[in-house]
Image (cartoon, rainbow, N blue to C red):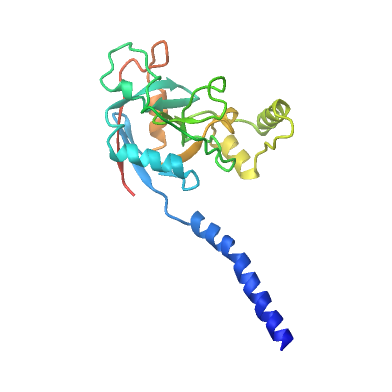
Amino acid sequence: MNAQRTLVTLTTTLAFLSLPLLTSAQKGSEKRSRVEIRTELGTMVVELYNETPQHRDNFLKLVKEHTYDSLLWHRVIPQFMVQGGDPDSKRAKPGQPLGSGGPGYTIPAEINKAFIHKKGVLSAARQGDQVNPLKASSGSQFYLVQGKSYTAAELDMLVKRKQSMAPGKDFSYTPEQIEAYTKVGGTPHLDGEYTVFGEVVEGLDVIDKIAAVPTAPGDRPVQDVHMWMKVVK
């Protein structure tokens, strides 16, 4: 009788302990929301990470409110990134400085070391550490990474440099992440500094097209490139 009672108790305990694992697995398998980003140079589809819920929900909210429609890709730097989301860029005059606008709020950082700055990721722009030590994200501005390819040796040097700048802080790459940077490319120096909350799953070449347009001082394209967005999934 005592053995049976012990077995029942042990079985119940194991079942209870397994619940968080099941919950975590279910969360990882949830469908990701998708947003279509249309431009004069082509159309992309981005998938939003469920692991960054505040950024995901805010982005979806702004898309549904048509906040991004007709805004400009106001900052374009080849082999780095293309940036947009400044509300002031709608109907902006030629040569008008852009990049300081926003919805009037920021989003707490949701930096996750599982999400690196490989080519095609969607990341939140933000103010610098001097005025923003908690790395809070802009409420609307974002960028898509183009970047460039790196060798394993270059990545190793970058890791050592980051570790020397923050002793005791764990910073490393998985074999899969190293492969992404060596084969696909990206901007690894941004890892751990900005929130990555999605990635392009269709139309990756559109980033290259935007990044190739001529720009004026300040990195604004000479000829305006607009965006329009809608939720597709």
Name the residue furthest bottom: 1
Q: Can see residue 149?
A: no
Exactly how many numbered labels are in the figure?
A: 0
In the figure, residue 129 lies in which quadrant?
Answer: top right
Q: Can see residue 12?
A: yes
* Left or right: 142 in relation to 190: left
* Left or right: 168 in relation to 83: right
Task: Tell me where residue 125 appears, x and y as whole percent.
Answer: 46, 28
* Front-most of residues 217 and 141: 141
Q: Which residue is drawn at 42% across and 21% down?
A: 76
Q: In which quarter of the image is the N terminus?
A: bottom right
In the figure, residue 9 lies in which quadrant?
Answer: bottom right
* Left or right: 1 in relation to 31: right
* Left or right: 13 in relation to 32: right
Q: Residue at x 53, y 60 (%)?
A: 23
Task: Tell me where residue 2 appears, x and y as whole percent.
Answer: 73, 85
Task: Tell me where residue 217 appears, x and y as whole percent.
Answer: 41, 10
* Front-most of residues 58 and 117: 58
- 44 vs 51: above or below: above
Q: Which residue is drawn at 60% across and 68% down?
A: 16
* Front-most of residues 193 and 58: 58
Q: Which residue is drawn at 74% across and 30% down?
A: 167
Task: Tell me where residue 113 appears, x and y as whole percent.
Answer: 59, 40
* Front-most of residues 115 and 211: 115
- 180 vs 79: above or below: below
